[in-house]
Image (cartoon, rainbow, N blue to C red):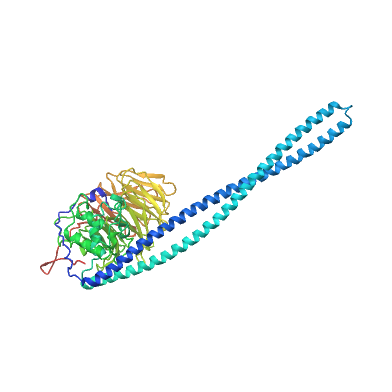
């Protein structure tokens, strides 16, 4: 893995040839049965659209009924609360009224007693009358309040009863509407099945005649190359996305792209015929437009073996790559190196090929072609002969491939994308492989079946490098967005972000124990930081250029390579520089090492491969990554390419 800015501005002076795909067969099937099946399919399609409209109406009714019911439930709760408060108030008022009545009785008795003794107690009588009048007025007031509360209570009880009755009716309406939805859904499913069967017949007839248009083989490559730059998830011009078959069939601001009943009137055809698409680019050719129109007339179908949710590039035929020249006119940068644990073989990047060299004499053992233009990272799978290759052709394609270096055979094309793949790493137990690239995503695969287990989207720019934690539960990244991040490998959650570099981060590794992480980049510092809180523990200076690569050795020491043309060995205890190794003539871009062998290998911008021994300060062997024909029996022969 090397400095991105150096990787993409230096191109080898090599001529490249392209081969155009063969023309599509033009023989036409018998039109009568095809048109019959096509019209049947369209009829079912229109029926589904009508049913879908009814379903939408019913579902809107359900939403409105649920909203009304929720409102009534809320009102019932409010009324119940008022009822409780009024009942409490009524009890208090009735208690007060009873007490007032008792006072009235006492006052009345007092009045009678006073009348008997009128002559002796005129003043007492007057006072009793006044008290009696006051008590009567108070009693009348409280009695009126009781009557008012009873009236309000009766109104609430009546309204509550009405709401309960209305709720019951609403529930019944919901049941009836749900039944209708189920019936329409069943009809829709049946109609969709029938439509699919008729389109299958259309496909069968065209396939028999050799005129079938495959979405994966003919349409997807066209959309990928001519449309996706402006109509992707991150930049959907006109709200039209074309990343996958499913999203492109949803259409954009102008509605659906295809009209199955009248294919020639499809929005997609109108846009490409008048040249409005592709925008700011050459229009599609008449043959390309005719192919798209034919695809729509055949139902705008997706191949049965493809997934509608897969990116277009994943369902397209695997790209074919140029055959590398037998002899390079000039060395090319060694972007990636990998040292086998046997210490006898080293793999390096080449031009459209992987090169396997002998460490004993620097001779070329095997050339493995069928690779994208540039290889950006390499990793052996433990002690096996399997090697993972991260490669890509800038602006076109990125791919991860698994090769057997003994036979040169391709074991698996593991991952393909429209952005170059910049890094990869096997977990310590070799059960998982992580890959990253210029698209900003990280993908995890399990190596038993090579199935993808997780995709992580979190970085805002290229992910240059990745590394597993010792226990395989976390993965760390180095990105061009100037951050290093740590993710949970089960959930994909971002556990921590380190912003200490303030510049492009090119390389990363966990330290033994998994609690600290080492990162390097264009700020010329090796920084050690804690996983727990992303706090920097220490940083190592003394680099005269950007750190392009680092490797954690089995004994805990770290190797670093930088553009100041030096390899450095760091202590396990505090990552201080233990030894500086010199000798390369050009900036170092890649490295690998094995502590048990006391051996390392590095690659440079000038195309040099250097073999190092840890007890030596200079390379013990240096050669150019420049394949040349092998001379045997006086004749020049090309080295075997697989």
Please count the marks in the image. 0
Whether residue 626 appears in this view of the structure is: yes
Residue situated in front as seen by the camera: 126 or 261: 126
Task: Find residue 375 and report its horizontal and vertical position in percent.
Answer: 25, 57
Q: Residue at x 17, y 70 (%)?
A: 27
Indicate the quadrant where residue 42 lies.
bottom left
Residue 375 appears in view: no
Question: Observer-nearest residue: 626 or 277?
Answer: 277
Please state the horizontal and vertical placement of residue 95, each as a whole percent of the image: 73, 42
In the rendered image, residue 169, in percent from the top left (x then y), is placed at: 53, 57
Q: Residue furthest left?
A: 634
Q: Position of residue 150 (x, y in %)?
A: 66, 45
As drawn, 211 above or below 244: below
Q: Quadrant of residue 337?
A: bottom left
Q: Is residue 345 left or right of residue 16?
A: right
**Residue drawn 30% across the image and 70% down it:** 198
Q: Nearer the viewer, residue 92 or 100?
A: 100
Question: In the picture, which quadrant includes the C terminus?
Answer: bottom left
């Amino acid at each position: 893995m090397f400095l991105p800015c150096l990787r993409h501005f230096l191109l080898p002076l090599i001529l490249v040839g392209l081969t155009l795909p063969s023309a599509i067969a033009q023989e036409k099937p018998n039109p009568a049965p095809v048109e019959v099946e096509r019209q049947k399919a369209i009829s079912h399609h229109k029926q589904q659209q009508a049913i879908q409209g009814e379903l939408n109406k019913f579902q809107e009714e359900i939403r409105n009924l649920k909203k009304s019911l929720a409102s009534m439930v809320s009102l019932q709760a409010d009324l119940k609360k008022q009822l409780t408060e009024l009942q409490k108030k009524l009890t208090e008022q009735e208690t007060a009224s009873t007490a007032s009545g008792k006072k009235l009785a006492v006052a009345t008795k007092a009045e009678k007693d006073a009348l008997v003794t009128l002559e002796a107690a005129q003043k007492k009588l007057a006072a009793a009358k006044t008290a009696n009048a006051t008590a009567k007025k108070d009693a009348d007031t409280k009695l009126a309040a009781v009557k008012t509360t009873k009236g309000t209570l009766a109104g609430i009880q009546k309204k509550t009863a009405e709401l309960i009755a209305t709720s019951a009716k609403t529930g019944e309406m919901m049941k009836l509407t749900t039944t209708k939805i189920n019936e329409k859904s069943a009809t829709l499913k049946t109609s969709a099945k029938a439509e699919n069967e008729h389109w299958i017949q259309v496909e069968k007839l065209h396939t028999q005649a050799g005129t079938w248009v495959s979405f994966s083989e003919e349409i997807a490559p066209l959309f990928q190359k001519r449309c996706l730059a402006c109509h992707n998830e991150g930049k959907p011009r006109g709200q039209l996305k074309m990343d996958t078959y499913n999203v492109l069939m949803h259409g954009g601001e102008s509605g659906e792209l295809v009209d199955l009943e009248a294919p020639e009137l499809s929005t997609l055809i109108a846009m490409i015929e008048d040249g409005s698409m592709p925008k700011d680019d050459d229009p599609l050719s008449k043959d390309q437009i005719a192919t798209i129109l034919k695809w729509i007339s055949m139902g705008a179908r997706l191949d049965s073996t493809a997934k509608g949710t897969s990116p277009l590039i994943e369902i397209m035929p695997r790209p074919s790559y140029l055959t590398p020249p037998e002899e390079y006119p000039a060395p090319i940068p060694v972007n990636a190196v990998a040292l086998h644990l046997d210490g006898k073989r080293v793999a390096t990047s080449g031009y459209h090929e992987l090169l396997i060299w002998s460490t004993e004499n620097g001779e070329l053992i095997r050339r493995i072609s069928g690779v994208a233009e540039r290889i950006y990272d390499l990793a052996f799978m433990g002690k096996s002969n399997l090697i993972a290759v991260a490669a890509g052709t800038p602006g076109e394609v990125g791919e991860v491939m698994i090769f057997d270096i003994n036979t040169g055979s391709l074991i698996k094309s593991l991952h393909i994308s429209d952005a170059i793949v910049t890094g990869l790493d096997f977990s310590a137990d070799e059960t998982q492989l992580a890959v990253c690239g210029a698209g900003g995503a990280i993908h995890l695969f399990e190596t038993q079946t090579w199935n993808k287990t997780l995709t992580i989207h979190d970085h805002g720019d290229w992910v240059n490098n990745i590394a597993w934690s010792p226990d395989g539960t976390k993965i760390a990244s180095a990105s061009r967005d100037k951050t290093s991040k740590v993710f949970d490998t089960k959930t994909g959650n971002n556990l921590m972000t380190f912003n200490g570099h303030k510049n492009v981060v090119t390389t990363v590794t966990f330290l033994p124990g998994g609690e600290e992480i080492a990162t390097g980049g264009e700020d010329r510092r090796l920084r050690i930081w804690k996983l727990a809180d992303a706090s920097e523990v220490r940083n190592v200076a003394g680099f005269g250029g950007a750190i392009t690569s680092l490797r954690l050795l089995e004994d805990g020491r770290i190797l670093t390579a930088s553009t100041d043309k030096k390899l450095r060995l760091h202590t396990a205890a505090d990552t201080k520089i233990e030894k500086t190794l010199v000798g390369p003539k050009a900036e170092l871009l890649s490295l690998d090492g094995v502590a048990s062998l006391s051996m390392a290998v590095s690659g440079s911008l000038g195309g040099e491969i250097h073999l190092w021994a840890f007890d030596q300060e200079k390379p013990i062997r240096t050669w150019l990554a420049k394949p040349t024909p092998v001379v045997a029996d006086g004749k020049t022969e090309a080295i075997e390419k697989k």
